[in-house]
Image (spheres, helix red, strand yellow):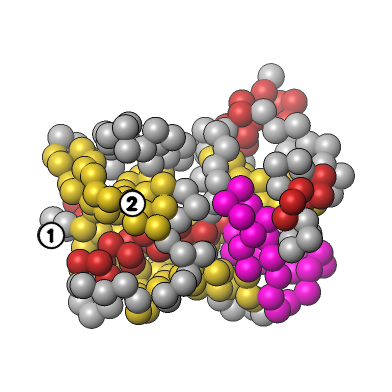
Amino acid sequence: MRFVKGHGTQNDFVILPDPDGRLDLSPELVAAICDRRAGVGADGVLRVVPAKLCPEVAGQAGEAEWFMDYRNADGSVAEMCGNGVRVFARYLVEAGLAAPGELGVATRAGVRRVRLGATGDVTVDMGLPRVFGTSRAVVAGREYPGVCVDVGNPHLACLTDEPVGGIDLTRPPSFDPAVFPQGVNVELLNRAGGRRVAMRVYERGSGETRSCGTGTVAAAVAAARAAGETTGAWTVEVPGGEVRVTLEEHTAFLTGPAVLVAEGEIHAAALVA
């Protein structure tokens, strides 16, 4: 099984080319691939497969040739990944499957338009984030109020005055399952001066990660809301670097790096033996 390894602000992924749509990715195999000691190691898997070969997104094939079949590190299926889609697009260009410029990528959250050159940052049209109320997360025994934001997947973005660098994220946050029946990504964020915020995230299915693209959009929405705004450009600092989020009236754009660092072959039989 051929693979490529990449990351966006150190949110890392194993990319699996599947041009014929034949790969059978069980949750157990995905979790084994993502294992950082016994596998390749990653926050998730990106299967690269033609949209027309996948019934769940075949209706998007007219706008996007390739489907980003994203799986979390525990093997569960996810709707969307903002860092992943940038890395996915970078792979398409470097593999000769797409030309630099603008292209569509099929996802479970709909087609995402991506702009990239031969090098440099990648920009994704993330669609319009939807705020659907407020809720609370409990992290290490402490409650953090937050804003519920749908960015194609669910988020609870919690703005706090407590420095996020010192918060214990070694265990999953608790949340209200009535609000988030499919689970939720929890962001903790601080104002960092001007239109900047610092953020850490606990992702459902992956644990704490160095960055979360959709989470940075949710964080920008929460910060803008706290400032009495709905639009504007924000810089979001994460442990793995920083990205830029531009909130517009009808959509949001995420801009940041996408880097491919390695390629090789996975011996799948050894992983699941």
Residue under the image location 71 percent in, 26 percent down: 270
Q: Looking at numbered disc 1 in the image, what kind of residue is underneath it?
A: Asp
Name the one closer to the observer, 197 or 78. 78
Give the position of the N terminus as an image quadrant.
top right
Measured from the top left, where is residue 14 in percent x and y?
63, 48
Residue under numbered circle 1: 161
Measured from the top left, where is residue 103 in percent x and y?
70, 70
* Residue 44 located left or right of residue 250: right
Residue under the image location 35 percent in, 76 percent down: 231
The answer to if 87 sits in the magenta stretch is yes
Measured from the top left, where is residue 79 in percent x and y?
55, 46
**Residue 225 position by quadrant:** bottom left
Residue under the image location 36 percent in, 59 percent down: 218
Q: Which residues are magenta?
A: 85-113
Q: Looking at numbered disc 2 in the image, what kind of residue is underneath it?
A: Phe
**Residue 125 position by quadrant:** bottom right
Residue under numbered circle 2: 132
